[in-house]
Image (tube, rainbow, N blue to C red):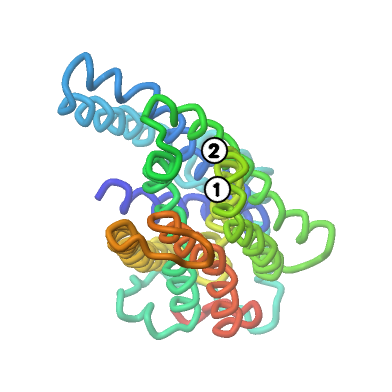
Amino acid sequence: LGEAGNFPAAIKTTAEYFPKKDRAFSTSIFNAGATVGALAAPITIPFIAKAYGWEMAFIIIGALGFIWMGFWVFMYDKPDRHPRVSAAELEYIHQDDIADRKLEGYVPETTTKVSLMQCFKYKQTWAFAFGKFMTDGVWWFFLFWTPAYLSSVYGMDSTEAAFPLFVLYMITLLSIIGGWLPTYFVERKGMNPYEGRMKSMLIFAFFPLLALVAQPLGHISYWLPVIIIGISGAAHQSWSANIFTTVGDMFPKKAIATITGIGGLAGGIGSTIINKGSGMLFDFTKETDMAFMGFQGIEAGYFIIFSICAVCYLIGWSVMKILVPKYTPITDL
C-alpha cells in the first residue's frame, strides 16, 4: 500500500518541479533509490533478523518510512509556494507552460477534479497501462527469481549468491544514464519531449534481448547471466523512468497521479501473472525433466521465461506507438 501511493505522488512531484525535458532524468534518480534499497537489504536485514527476530526486521525497516515522511511533510511544498525556489528557478520549471501559452489554440489547465472513469476514455491511458503491464513483470521476475536461479541452476546458497547479486544491482544503477538520454534528444536534436522519450525507450527495449543468450552463456560462467540480467535490469529502470514521464507529457498535472496509479495497477497484474506463471513452469519442468531447445529440466524453464522477458519491451513499445503515434497532449480534462 505504501509503495502504491508513493510512486504516483513521486511522478506528480517531478511534473511539478521539472520541465518535460528533465523529468525522465529526475525520475531515474529517485527510481535508483529502489536499487540502493536492494543493495542495502542483503547486508542489513539478515543481521537485524538474526539479532532481534524476523518480525523486527519488518518493523524497523517499515519505521524508516515514517522518518522519511517527517522530512517530506516539513520540507516539501509546490514550487510556486516554496520559499527556497527563486524567480529564475520558477521560470525554468514553468518553461513548458510559457511556451504553450504562445501556441495557437492554447487551453489553460482547469482545477476541476478528474474522475477515474474519465481517464479510461483516452488512448494515452491505455498506451501507458499496456507498457507497464508488459514490462513491470520482467523487473519483478528478475528481482524475485534471480536468487532462486543461482540456487537451482548453480547450487549457490544465500551467502555465495550475495556478491553476484550485489554486482547485479550495481549494474542497474547505470539506469541514471537512461534518464538523461531524452534530455539529450530534446536539447541537441530538437525533438519534442515525447518524441525524445519514445526514441530512448526504443533503444532501451533492445537491451533485454540479451536475455535470450543468458542461459546458453551460463554454461561458460554464472557471471555471464548475472551481468546480462544486470544490464536488462538497468534497461528496465531506464525504460521505467521514461514511461512514467510520458504521463506528464500528455496529461495535465491534476491527472498525473491518477493515470500513474492506473499504470501501476496494470504493472502489478502483469507482475503477478509472470511470477505465478514462472513458478508453475519451474515446478513442471523440474518434475517432468522437460527438454526444450537443448536445455533440460528447470534450466529449460528459465530459458523459456528469459526468452519471454527479452521481447516484452519491444512488444510494449510497438503497441504504445500504435496507440499514440505522435505527441498528442490531452487538453479537455
- The percent position of residue 102, horizontal first and vertical second, equals 71, 73
- The percent position of residue 244, horizontal first and vertical second, equals 51, 60
Please tell me which residue is depicted at 64% across the width and 42% down the height of the picture.
174
Q: Residue 168 has which mark?
A: 2
Question: What amino acid is found at the position of numbered circle 1 in the picture?
Answer: Ile
The one nearer the camera, 282 or 75, is 282
Question: Of marks 2 and 1, which one's residue comes earlier in the chain?
Answer: 2
**Where is residue 239, by image quadrant?**
bottom right
- Label 1, secondary structure: give it: helix
Q: Residues within 10 Å of mark 1 (few under 14, many from 20)?
A: many
Q: Is residue 276 left or right of residue 310?
A: left
Dot 1 corresponds to which residue? 229
Q: Is residue 139 left or right of residue 271?
A: right
Q: Residues within 10 Å of mark 2 (few under 14, many from 20)?
A: many
**Where is residue 329, by image quadrant?**
bottom right
The one nearer the camera, 125 or 280, is 280
Q: Is residue 46 left or right of residue 94?
A: left
Please tell me which residue is depicted at 23% across the width and 22% down the height of the picture.
49
Q: Are marks 2 and 1 in contact (CB under 8 Å)?
A: yes
- The percent position of residue 149, horizontal first and vertical second, equals 42, 45
Q: Is residue 63 above or below residue 117?
A: above
Please tell me which residue is depicted at 27% across the width and 59% down the height of the picture.
287
Q: Residue furthest right?
A: 188
- The percent position of residue 184, horizontal first and vertical second, equals 77, 54
Question: What amino acid is found at the position of numbered circle 2 in the picture?
Answer: Leu
On the question of residue 96 being in view, the answer is no
Q: Residue 249 has which mark?
A: none
